[in-house]
């Protein structure tokens, strides 16, 4: 079972018992520091191709698609079609890895067709080739917070990713959603030691800063 946000904060608080508990050490601040360092280490793990093997870190989400003019999708030179499909709303934030957004799978809602990530310029070159009509693969790219799918006619797309935003509001109605502290974190368990150490160091430096400034001021007065 994945560790919840509340459990993650409590875990770090236990590590920080030896540090002065100033008022500014709120749950919100602690969790922001946890996420900050988690992103650093997750990006490193993504570079080593380890992240996608951990099932509990990924959540699936189905996003509604609408038809838009190709001129807004980053490849206006394509002449094969007039319209592309695009997610209706801005996508929730996705954690960034060494190779961009950490998306494990993009498929049709029924999982029958896979969609491959590609650059708009690459798709444009492919679409202008004489053999493209024989290409049955589906493609997507992300631009300005939207996902574009140039050669599908679906009503929705299914994305399995490491979300950086709370996506429960898109998965259930208000009565069914769990509170934020009970929602899972997308952090591998084996990274917690490094994350806790980094958070401790940062908070330790922050706590020492006022004293250091006072000492510096006294030194200036002596000179």
Image (cartoon, rainbow, N blue to C red):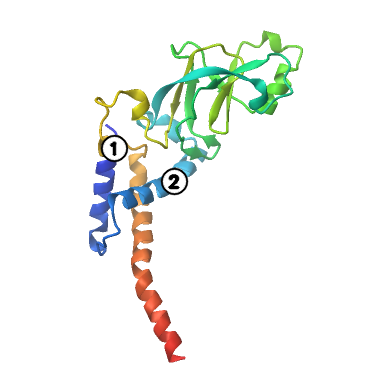
Circle 1 packing at 10 Å, graded few (<14), some (14-19), many (20+), is few
24 in relation to 157, above or below: below
- Could you say which disc has been placed on residue 150 in the image? none
Q: Residue at x 65, y 11 (%)?
A: 135
> Residue shown at 27%/28% (left/top)?
177
Q: Nearer the viewer, residue 82 or 222?
A: 82
In percent of width and height, residue 175 lies at 24, 25
Mark 2 vs mark 1: give the one in front. 1
Q: What quarter of the picture does the N terminus occupy? A: top left
Q: Which residue is mark 1?
A: 180
Q: Residue at x 69, y 26 (%)?
A: 75
Give the side of residue 44 with respect to residue 79, left or right: left
Left or right of 196 in this view: 77: right
| Disc number placed over residue 41 in the picture, else none | 2
Residue 93: image location, x then y, percent = 46, 35
Count of all numbered marks drawn on residues in the image: 2
Q: Nearer the viewer, residue 122 or 171?
A: 171
Q: CA distance from mark 2 to mark 1?
A: 23 Å
Task: Tell me: residue 97, above or below residue 123.
Answer: below
What element does badge 1 sit on? helix
């Amino acid at each position: 079972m994945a560790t919840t946000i509340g459990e993650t904060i409590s875990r770090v608080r236990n590590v920080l018992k030896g540090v002065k508990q100033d008022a500014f050490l709120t749950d919100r601040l602690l969790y922001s520091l946890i996420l900050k360092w988690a992103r650093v280490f997750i990006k490193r793990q993504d570079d080593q191709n380890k992240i996608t093997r951990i099932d509990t870190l990924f959540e699936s989400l189905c996003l509604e698609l609408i038809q838009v003019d190709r001129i807004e999708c980053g490849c206006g030179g394509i002449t094969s079609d007039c319209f592309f499909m695009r997610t209706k709303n801005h996508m929730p934030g996705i954690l960034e890895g060494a190779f961009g957004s950490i998306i494990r799978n993009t498929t049709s809602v029924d999982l029958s067709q896979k969609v491959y990530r590609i650059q708009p310029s690459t798709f444009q070159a492919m679409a202008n080739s004489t053999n493209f009509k024989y290409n049955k693969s589906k493609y997507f790219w992300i631009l300005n917070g939207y996902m574009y799918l140039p050669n599908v006619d679906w009503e929705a797309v299914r994305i399995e990713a490491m979300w950086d935003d709370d996506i429960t509001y898109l998965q259930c109605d208000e009565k069914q959603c769990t509170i934020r502290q009970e929602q899972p974190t997308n952090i591998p368990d084996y990274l917690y030691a490094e994350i806790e150490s980094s958070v401790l160091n940062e908070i330790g430096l922050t706590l020492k800063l006022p004293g250091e400034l006072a000492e510096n001021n006294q030194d200036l007065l002596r000179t």
